[in-house]
Image: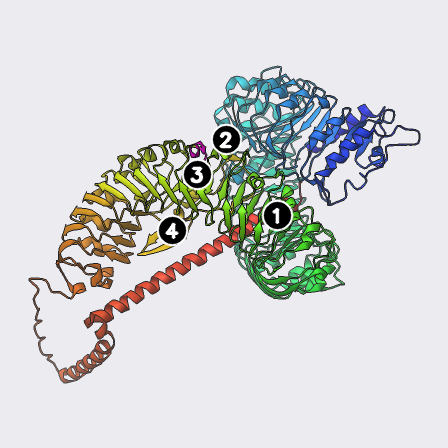
């Protein structure tokens, strides 16, 4: 809040400096007799406007043949006509902002501009250009909160007149340029950026006029504990010395700095400091001098933040040991190692405390009453294990509390009781309540909510266990509710009609529940008092049935409509959307809907996010999309399209981030247009019938998936595809040699050219793909040896060159240089020589397939070095973070905002059948060395690979005995040692394998009795045939030494009731004989029946396990998809603090 007032102060200060020469209105700056705007400057503004998306009419007055000094958001000098102020800041409350491709360089023709504000807009992945000396009059530059990407331009140091520079809350990365230290007049500098790294330049210490300094990420720190979180941070020493930055009033430093005692002296000299944030200083608690310096500053501070500093209660007490603060209004101690006593201590610190943040601090509330903070308005206790009785009699924490956040606190139903009247009275002022990600289950939770207060504006109960219907009383009582988040629960019943009595509701998110019935009726009521305020409805992944009524158009202010993953059917046409002039996000995917919109229809809206996956849209290509100039995400996959794609459509790619038109029947060739794709989109056109040559302009994408088409030619040409991360051209008809142009796309991560008609040798230039993580060349006609340049690809996780005609030995550098490999498949080539010992360096390998080659000599005994195969479980989180998440070192190159569509897929001989696997690295651990000329014994070290689920050494020349410890491979499901020269007995430990389903030991020289027990009884004689000296029940062949054991007769029963007992036992025996031998006897006595029956049971269990795994995977994909979509809309879902 204080930062906001500082910002406003600097704006007013600048305006006062300009007041003598500039008219003070943003709407009409030109009066009678004043100079009109300069023609070149007007043209520059129109050029600047061209690439922008203006859905809210911010630039509606910017037209040809008008005086630009009369345009909105412009200030001109009334004497000269030169533009001196351009204020295009956006807002999310209410909504108005710009988007699209920003071209700041066109503004170089505004040489007298002094004030430029482009903050709070939606310029996703736009780079901040290198600003030249043309802006040497610029005093105010605000580009914050606008999704800019790239590095901080060093040319900002040329803007020597700057007083105000704010780049905060953007996706900028890299180091802070030392040239920032040239800006001697700066009063305000905000570089609060998520991906900053490196050291703080000491030159910043020379900015003697600075009042406000913010360096480092201001992202909520406890989100770093979530999976796949990526971030760099500032580090090194804090370079400031005594005398530096003497006028600072606000200091924010976020990073894992190496703080030293001598640096603390500088901090203690900042006598004007009122706001201090020192976050992520992990060794702060060990520096007494720093704690002492902070303590001296506290009496003057209004805000203090020491987040993620490893502080203990004793450290906090030492900060305030000699005094309390009368001025402190905000205290943030989140992500430290505190205890419940911190609440009482915080109360003693300041009676004026208004905001208290203690999230992720290991706090448990005491059973005794909490202190009552007389001024507290905001309290965050998220990610603590709070007491189950906190809301009973001990939570009278503040009568002025307006915002309470208790996300992920392990709260249960018993935490909330209707009888806790003291709590109700104490929380009557509450406006915002976050109880998400807890263990709340029953519907009485809703009764508790409206019994203690009906003033709530915001309720978040997402990701609990809430079940049953939402009570009618809840809707009738919560008349003030504006935002309600109930997604990811187990709510049942119909969507309540009581939402129609809520006059202020704006956002309603009910996705991922079990709601059923027809489309909610409250949206169809023309008398609904809230229909002119309602903005967002999310019913995704429920069980809603029936048609979408045309009366939905009554909600004229609707901006977001998400209905994905239901059972809706019927037609959707123009009438449904005729009043939606604000609609920017529509998701109808995975229903049974037919979208029938006429080709001449012009919608009243400009949509940004359109998802129609699995809806029937075709057969013709939807022409109405030509009117949509703001599309940034489009999914028309599996739409039944059977048409050519019109040329105008490809122009839409210039502002897109994702395009998915896969699984249609789109035909023809894609024209090779001269287009620029500045946002590095993800383009998915797989499973169509596109043909001809792959156009070069598509290589500007970050992800290009063109598999399963009819493309016949591919070349990199002279294009430099600097941002292409994924290229999938598998299953096409590309002929000829591999192109030798990989230097121009050398930042590739995933390259898949499998199942084409490629021939010739692998070009040496493939070795320039040093970032490559997956190289898939399966099923082509490639020849020759692997080029030695490939050893430069040290980041490879997957290498699949199977089903080609490659020859020569397996290079030793495969093991030496490619130690990140998880999947190595060279099946079906002409490779010769021995298995190099260097393969044992592949400690991460999980899938190794060298089958059907000409390899000779023995199997290396160092296999126990394959660490990943020695583990019983696969670390899926660690592998996913390596494979499917572009880490922060790639964020400068690729579009990291959205998840990748590409995933690893292989063909593998599994249980005797060649099968396809997607994401095999998350489920399989297998070795296949079959069909070679390997000799020698099976090394006992192979029995140390406890994680193996499949082992195939068949069709070799192996000899010796089967290792007796083979039973240690308890997870093994398939074992094939057939067609070798193995001898000796079959180890009895084989019968200890609980999961073994496929066993083939045929065509060897094994001898002795075949073990019995567990799965060994299910294998028929084909598993053991052509082993002359084997015997046992499986072969229906008795072994020498077998004899019939005759049991002695039992002594006759004696006693008074022996006749009765004899009759009873006789009848039991007859019943048992009839039931057992009549039904189960044939299964035991007749081997074919027994084998057939047990194999049926085995297959049934296998099928059920597979189906359960598939269902779980589908459910996980649905949840992940819902989370991904929610990230896309998050910036507009709540809009608080934007």
Mark 2 or mark 1, which has the lower sequence index?
2
Residues in magenta? 765-773
Mark 4 or mark 1, which has the lower sequence index?
1
Frontmost of labels 3 and 4 is 4
| Quarter containing the C terminus | top right
Question: In this figure, which residue is indicated by the disc labeled 3?
Answer: 773
- Residues at marks 1 and 3, CA–CA distance in whole angstroms: 27 Å
Q: Residue furthest top?
A: 243
- Residues at marks 2 and 4, CA–CA distance in whole angstroms: 59 Å
Neighbour tally class for label 3: few under 14, some 14-19, many 20 plus, Cα within 10 Å: many
Question: In this figure, which residue is indicated by the disc labeled 2?
Answer: 314
Neighbour tally class for label 2: few under 14, some 14-19, many 20 plus, Cα within 10 Å: few
**Helix, strand or loop status at disc 4:** strand
Q: Is residue 767 magenta?
A: yes
Q: Is residue 890 left or right of residue 1102?
A: right
- Residues at marks 2 and 3, CA–CA distance in whole angstroms: 48 Å
Q: Which mark is residue 633?
A: 1
Q: Which mark is residue 907?
A: 4
């Amino acid at each position: 809040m204080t930062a906001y007032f500082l910002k406003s102060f600097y704006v007013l200060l600048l305006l006062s400096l300009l007041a003598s020469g500039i008219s003070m209105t943003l709407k009409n700056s030109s009066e009678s007799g004043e100079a009109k705007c300069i023609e070149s400057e007007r043209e520059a503004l129109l050029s600047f406007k061209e690439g922008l998306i203006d859905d809210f009419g911010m630039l509606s007055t910017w037209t040809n043949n008008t005086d630009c000094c009369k345009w909105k958001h412009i200030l001109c000098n009334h004497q000269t006509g030169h533009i001196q102020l351009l204020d295009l800041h956006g807002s999310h409350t209410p909504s108005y902002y710009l988007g699209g491709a920003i071209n700041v360089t066109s503004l170089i023709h505004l040489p007298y501009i002094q004030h430029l504000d482009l903050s709070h807009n939606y310029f996703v992945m736009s780079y901040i250009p290198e600003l030249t000396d043309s802006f040497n009059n610029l005093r105010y530059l605000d580009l914050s909160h606008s999704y800019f990407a790239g590095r901080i331009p060093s040319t900002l140091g040329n803007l020597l007149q700057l007083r105000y520079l704010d780049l905060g809350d953007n996706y900028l990365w890299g180091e802070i340029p030392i040239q920032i230290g040239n800006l001697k007049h700066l009063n305000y500098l905000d570089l609060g950026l998520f991906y900053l790294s490196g050291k703080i330049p000491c030159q910043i210490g020379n900015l003697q006029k600075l009042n406000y300094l913010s360096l480092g990420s201001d992202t909520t720190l406890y989100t770093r504990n979530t999976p796949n979180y990526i971030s760099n941070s500032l580090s090194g020493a804090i370079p400031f010395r005594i005398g530096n930055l003497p006028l600072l009033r606000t200091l924010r430093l976020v990073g894992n700095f190496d703080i030293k005692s001598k640096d603390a002296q500088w901090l203690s000299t900042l006598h004007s400091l009122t706001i201090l944030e020192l976050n992520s200083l992990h060794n702060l608690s060990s520096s007494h001098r720093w704690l002492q310096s902070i303590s001296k500053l506290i009496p003057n501070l209004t805000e203090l933040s020491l987040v993620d500093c490893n502080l203990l209660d004793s450290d906090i007490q030492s900060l305030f040991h000699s005094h309390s603060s009368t001025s402190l209004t905000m205290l943030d101690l989140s992500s430290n190692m505190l205890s419940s006593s911190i609440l009482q201590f915080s109360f003693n610190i300041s009676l004026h405390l208004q905001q208290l943040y203690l999230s992720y601090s290991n706090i448990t509330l005491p059973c005794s009453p909490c202190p009552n903070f007389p001024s507290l308005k905001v309290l965050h206790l998220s990610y603590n294990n709070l007491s189950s009785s906190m809301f009973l009699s001990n939570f009278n924490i503040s009568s002025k509390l307006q915002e309470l956040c208790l996300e992920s606190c392990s709260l249960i139903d018993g935490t909330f009781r209707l009888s806790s009247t003291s709590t109700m009275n104490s929380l009557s002022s509450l406006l915002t309540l976050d109880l998400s990600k807890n263990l709340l289950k029953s519907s009485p939770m809703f009764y508790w909510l409206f019994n203690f207060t009906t003033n709530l504006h915001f309720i978040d109960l997402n990701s609990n266990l809430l079940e049953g219907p939402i009570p009618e009383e809840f809707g009738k009582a919560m008349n003030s509710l504006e935002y309600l988040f109930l997604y990811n629960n187990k709510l049942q019943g119909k969507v309540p009609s009581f939402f129609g009595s809520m006059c202020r509701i704006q956002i309603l998110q009910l996705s991922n529940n079990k709601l059923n019935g027809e489309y909610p009726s409250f949206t169809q009521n023309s008398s609904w008092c809230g229909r002119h305020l309602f903005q967002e409805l999310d019913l995704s992944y429920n069980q809603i049935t029936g048609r979408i009524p045309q009366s939905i158009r009554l909600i004229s202010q609707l901006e977001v409509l998400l209905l994905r993953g239901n059972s809706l059917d019927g037609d959707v046409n123009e009438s449904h959307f005729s009043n939606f002039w604000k609609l920017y996000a529509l998701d109808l995917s995975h229903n049974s809907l037919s979208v029938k919109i006429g080709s001449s229809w012009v919608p009243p809206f400009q949509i940004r996010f359109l998802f129609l996956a699995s809806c029937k849209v075709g057969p013709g290509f939807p022409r109405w999309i030509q009117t949509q100039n703001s599309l940034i995400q489009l999914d028309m996959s599996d739409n039944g399209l059977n048409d050519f794609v019109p040329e105008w459509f490809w122009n839409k790619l210039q502002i897109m981030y994702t395009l998915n038109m896969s699984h249609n029947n789109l035909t023809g060739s894609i024209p090779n247009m001269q287009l620029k794709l500045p946002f590095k989109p993800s383009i998915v056109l797989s499973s169509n019938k596109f043909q001809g040559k792959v156009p070069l302009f598509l290589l500007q994408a970050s992800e290009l998936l063109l598999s399963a088409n009819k493309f016949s030619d591919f070349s990199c040409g002279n294009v430099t595809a600097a941002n292409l991360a994924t290229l999938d051209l598998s299953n096409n008809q590309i002929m000829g040699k591999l192109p030798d142009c990989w230097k121009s796309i050398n930042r590739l991560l995933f390259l898949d050219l499998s199942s084409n008609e490629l021939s010739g040798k692998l070009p040496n230039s493939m070795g320039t793909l040093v970032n490559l993580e997956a190289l898939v060349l399966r099923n082509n006609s490639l020849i020759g040896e692997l080029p030695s340049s490939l050893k430069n690809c040290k980041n490879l996780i997957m290498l699949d060159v199977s089903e080609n005609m490659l020859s020569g030995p397996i290079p030793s550098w495969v093991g030496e240089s490619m130690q990140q490999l998880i999947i190595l498949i060279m099946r079906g080539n002409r490779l010769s020589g021995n298995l190099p010992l260097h393969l044992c360096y592949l400690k991460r390998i999980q899938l190794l397939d060298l089958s059907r080659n000409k390899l000779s000599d023995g199997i290396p005994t160092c296999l126990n070095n394959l660490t990943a195969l020695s583990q019983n479980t696969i670390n899926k989180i660690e592998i996913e973070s390596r494979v499917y998440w572009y880490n922060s070192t790639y964020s400068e190159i690729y579009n990291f905002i959205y998840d990748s569509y590409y995933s690893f897929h292989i063909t593998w001989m599994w249980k005797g059948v060649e099968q396809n696997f997607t994401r095999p690295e998350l489920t399989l651990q297998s070795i296949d060395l079959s069909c070679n000329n390997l000799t020698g014994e099976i090394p006992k070290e192979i029995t140390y690979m406890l994680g193996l689920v499949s082992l195939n050494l068949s069709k070799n020349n192996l000899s010796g005995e089967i290792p007796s410890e083979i039973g240690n491979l308890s997870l093994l499901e398939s074992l094939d040692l057939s067609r070798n020269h193995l001898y000796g007995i079959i180890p009895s430990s084989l019968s200890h394998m609980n999961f073994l389903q496929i066993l083939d030991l045929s065509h060897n020289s094994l001898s002795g009795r075949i073990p019995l027990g567990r799965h060994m009884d299910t294998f028929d004689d084909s598993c053991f045939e052509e082993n002359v000296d084997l015997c046992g029940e499986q072969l229906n062949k008795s072994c020498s030494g077998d004899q019939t054991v005759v049991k002695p007769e039992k002594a006759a029963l004696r006693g008074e009731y022996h006749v009765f007992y004899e009759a009873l036992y006789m009848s039991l025996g007859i019943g048992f004989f009839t039931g057992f031998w009549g039904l189960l006897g044939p299964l035991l006595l007749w081997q074919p029946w027994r084998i057939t029956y047990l194999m049926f049971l085995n297959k049934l269990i296998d099928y059920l396990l597979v189906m359960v795994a598939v269902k779980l995977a589908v459910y996980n994909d649905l949840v992940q998809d819902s989370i991904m979509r929610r990230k896309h809309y998050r910036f507009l879902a709540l809009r608080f603090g934007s």
